[in-house]
Each structure stands twice: as structure tokens, then as C-alpha cells.
Amino acid sequence: MAASETIAAAAPSAARAPAIAYLATRHRVRVWEVLPWLLAIAAYFIFPDRMVFGSQVLVMVLFALSLDLILGYAGIVSLGHAAFFGLGAYAAALLTLRWNWQEPISGLFFAAAVAAAAGAASGWLLLRYRGLTLLVLTLATTIMLQELGNLLRDLTGGYDGLPGLIYTPLLGYFDYDLYGHVNYLYALAVLLVLFFVVRLIVYSPFGQGLAGIRENVARMHAVGSPVHWRLLTVYTIAAAIAGVAGALFTQTNAYVTLGVFDFDNSAGVMVMLILGGAGRLYGAFVGAVIYMVLQDNLSKASPQYWQFAVGLMLVLTVLFARRGLLGLIEDVARWIMPDRKP
Amino acid sequence: MDHAGPQTMSLTMSETIANAMQPTVPAALEIKNLNKSFGALPVARDIALALPKGGRHALIGPNGAGKTTLVNLITGVQRPSGGQILLDGEDITSLPQAARTRRGIARTFQINQLFRGLTVLENVYLAVAERMRVAHRLWRPAGAERDVIDQALAQLEALRLADDALKIVRELPYGRQRLVEIAIALALNPRVLLLDEPAAGVPSSESHLILDVIGALDPSIAILIIEHDMDVVFRFASRITVLVAGAVLTEGTPQQIRADARVRAVYLGEEFPHG
């Protein structure tokens, strides 16, 4: 095209090398990224009797990570993300209980497929809307799913749920123990794999496009981006990952109830992400760990009022650290070392 | 380049005959009898306009005349209730916005529409990635698409924005942001470029930077510019369309428009250079 001729005529500038270096290196794994994983392994040895709780934390990290893809990167605000968590949870439960398939890893794939199908179908319709409309539609869809689960009581066990689920030993070798040691490492391994999938996505041209949609959807249309298709793709991926988180939840607890579809679950995962920092990968780790540990300790100390502390933290975060705790840490780091590039 | 090609050849014989009064080469952009109403309020009434390849066409008119609406209709943000839009002779009236962009229509916005939280480089990267059809890739890092980065940087260099490449857009002064607005559109390598008041909001001490860029644009791009500054219009455009209340009042060369009594009447009370 003719325009490129004028472009070619312009001489490469001195600013070119650092600009290329910035884009070409930002996806590289940083040294500090080992830290959360080391901490997770350290927790395994330091709190050997808290591994059931530890597994639940890892499940919520994965769930929050899936929400980060759509909320933090693409800017889709959903209050119904528990729908995919719940579908994955029930897919994994029904597979073993009703259809007698007890191998856990294939159960994860099945749950991912079910949740992805639901994500694609609902996203195709819902992603035409944004803002408050989308918020209410996602919320309503999840409530309807929960009621549907209650209606199909013979299949789902209704609000009593499905207890006593049985799975074959992991990889045919590692049997589940009462203390949840195997479950913890299993959840950690799944989280590690899916974390790197998410990491790959957010640093790709596709992920860059999601940031574009978040920042200015009108301009993305104007540069020729098939916005709806992009959103549908990421929504489906996020649904699949949330489905895996739900399946892990079922498998590590060996039971499931319709509570997985609760509004509390959708709202809680969003609170985690906002606490930790949306749109920054590790925000899901920080937020889920803080939320779960707070919940665990405070609910013992004050079963009725523990949510007050979570609420207070959320208010403080939104008022003084809009980009979450990780954003706050970044700001402080930049304040101490102002010369460093973002 | 990718969007030339067979569409140009698809001009049918009947259309050629119908266009016999005009040059045989189809206009880069042609609008026929375009109509649009918001409820009972007509905002575009039988608008006709032809922009030859490399043409420099200005669209002027008082506030509320429907200038931005016309840009929205051409780019597909809004659908017309009647009429036709042709790009190099190909009917694009029913195509969605993204498809029109891919065929070579780009625009800038009267009020900045930028990716404010991203760097200048990322802003232009997004446009180049869409044009080069790599924006859907999710299995390799954005930084590995060196062609995209090189072309984005070249675009920034052409507009003297390279030094700001790694700055966050919202931290730039407004005049520089206005250049980013143009850089994104140019990064699409358009055949037809619609500039909606490109210097709007820029302090007069900086507006020459924008006008220099516009004056130096590739002569093969057909440009439709909406502009309020009549000095700019008369200097830049070889043809001018005057839009009033959604309808074309008149069209002509700058000399004809300057001499037109009706145009003067419309602009009575507004700045309009005499003589």
C-alpha cells in the first residue's frame, strides 16, 4: 500500500530499540514469579494438617484467575461466574456418581467441556450487552441454573447435594488421604498448568486486543476488530477454566451441593480479584489467599460478623488502592525506584 | 496490499453505464441518496458525495448539521435507512464496521477514542495487528510479532511520536494524544480516511503540528475532512460539501463555496473568511 512508502522513508529512530525491547521481553518469566509457587510448596510442609483448607484456597485461586481473564483483561463485569464453577462441579460429580466414570483427570476435561459449551452458548447472547445490563443478565442466568438444579432433584440431589463421591487414585497410583495431601498437590499441579495457559493468552496479540476492548471498545470496532467474536472466545476459555476449578472443588471435597451456584460464590470471587488486583495475573493469588485466610480465621472468632472485616478491606481497597494490593505494591515500588519502566 | 484486488474489478457493466457521466474509474468512496432518521428526526437526507482516489474533500456545516453522523454511516457505526455506500465501486452498505475497516476505510474521532491506559506503541500495535490479521493469535507472545512492532514503530516515527512510544497515552499532552488518534487510523493503511475535526480541542499554539501531518498525508489516500477552521478547509481541500440540517446545501471548489451567498447566510454570525 502506498502509505507504507512514506513510512519506509522515515529513518529508524533512537527510540526504536527500547520500544522493541519492551514488547519483546515483557512476557518473559520474571525471577520473582517463582515466589508464589515456592510459598505454595512451603505451605505443604509447614501446615501438613491444613491441606484440605489449602486445596480450597488453590481452587479459589484458579477460579479467581479465570475471572481475571474476562474482568481484569477484557473488562467484562459478570456477577454470574459461579455458573461455570457450578457446572464444572456438577459435571465432575455426575460423571462419577451417575455415569460411573471415576478417573479424576478426565473428569476435569469433561467439566471444562461442559462449562465451555455453556460459556459459548450464554456468551453468544449475553456479550452483546455491557455494564449494568450484563451484570443483571449474568446474575439472573446463574440463579436460573441453580433453580434448574433444584428442579432436577433426581439427578442433582437438590439442595442436599451429592455426598460421598468416589474417585480412582490419581494417575492410577496416588490414593486420596484423609489429610488432603494428594489433593493439595493435585490442585497445585492443575493450577500451575492452567496459570501458564492464562499467562500465554494475556501476553499474546489476542490478549493485547482484550486490553484494547477493555480500554475502548468503540475504537476496537473502528480498527476492524471482531469484538464480539474476541469476547466470546475469552468468555468460553474463562468458563472452561472456572469449570475445572469447580471440578477440582468437587473432587477434593468428594461432595457437591447447589451452594456452588450461590450469589456469594460469584460475588466472593470478584471481591478476591479486586482485593488482589484485577488484570495482573497474580492478583488472583494474593486476593484468594487473603480472603480465604481471613474468612477461615475470622469466621471461627466471630461466626456472625466476620464479613465485616472483609467488607472493610474491600472498602479500603476501592478507596485507596483501586488497582488492588498488587497495584499498591507496584505503586510503592515505583515510588521507591522511579526510574524503572512499568 | 491485501485490500486492493478483485473487488475493484467487480464493477458490473450496468453500473459502468449508469456511471457514464462520471470518470470510468470508480470513486474511492461514493455515497448515493443516503438517508437516516432518529425517530421522526431526519439526520441525513439524500446525501450524495463522491471522493476520487487521492481526493481531498472537506465537509463543513453548522453544529448539528449531521457531519459526524455521516462519518458514522460511512464507517458502519450506524446503519442508513436508505441509500448506498460504495467503496471502489463495491457496495458496502450492509457490511459491519469491522469488515469496512478491513476493506480500507479508517477514521479519526472528534473526541479522542484512545486506549488510554495503554502505551502509545500498544495503541498503534492494536491497529497494525488487526490489519495484518495476527490479532486473533493467542498462542505466542505479542512481542514475538516483530513485523507488527516494526510497522507500528515506523508509523510512530512518521508522526514524530517515537520518543513517546512507551508512555501511557493518558499521560500525554492533548496535542500529542491527537496525533496518536491519527496514528491509529493511519496504521490501518487506509484507502479512504475520514478525519473528524482532527485539530479539535488542540491549543492554537500546537495545532500546526496536526495540520502539518494532515498536509503531508500520502497523496493516494482519499480524505474526507470535517473541519470548522475555514482557513484550514480552503487550504487543504480541493472540493467542499456544505451540509445543513442533514442535507447537502451545495458542493463545489473552495472558490465557488467562498462566493456562495447561501453558504454565507448559513455561516452568518460565525467566522467565515470573506473574499
Image (cartoon, helix red, strand yellow):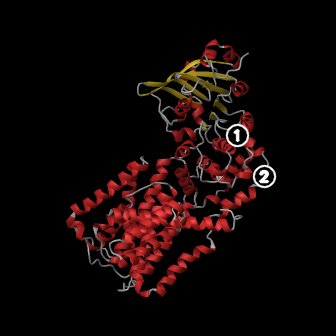
* A11 in relation to B246, above or below: below
Q: In the shown orientation, is residue A252 left or right of residue B213?
A: left
Disc 1/disc 2 C-alpha distance (Å): 19 Å
Image quadrant in which you'd find residue A114: bottom left
Chain of the residue displaying label 2 = A
**Residue A147 in picture, x, y percent from top left:** 25, 59
Work out which residue is located at the far top of the displayed protein and give it.
Answer: B261
For numbered disc 2, what is the local secondary structure?
loop
**Residue A180 in picture, x, y percent from top left:** 39, 83
Tell me which amino acid carries mark 1: Ala
**Location of mark 2 (residue):** A13
Callout in the foreground (1, 2): 2
10 Å neighbourhood of mark 1: few (<14), some, or many (≥20)? some
Total number of numbered discs in the rendering: 2
Of callouts 1 and 2, which one flags the residue occurring earlier in the amino acid sequence? 1
Same chain for marks 1 and 2? yes
Q: In the shown orientation, is residue B131 left or right of residue B38?
A: right
Point out the image quarter for the C terminus of chain A.
Answer: bottom right
Image quadrant in which you'd find residue B193: top right
Work out which residue is located at the far left of the displayed protein and give it.
Answer: A154
Q: Please name the residue shown 20% across and 66% down the image.
A: A154
* A300 in relation to A12, above or below: below
For numbered disc 1, what is the local secondary structure?
helix
**Location of mark 1 (residue):** A3
Tell me which amino acid carries mark 2: Ser
Nearer to us in this view, B164 or A6: B164
**Residue A198 in picture, x, y percent from top left:** 51, 64
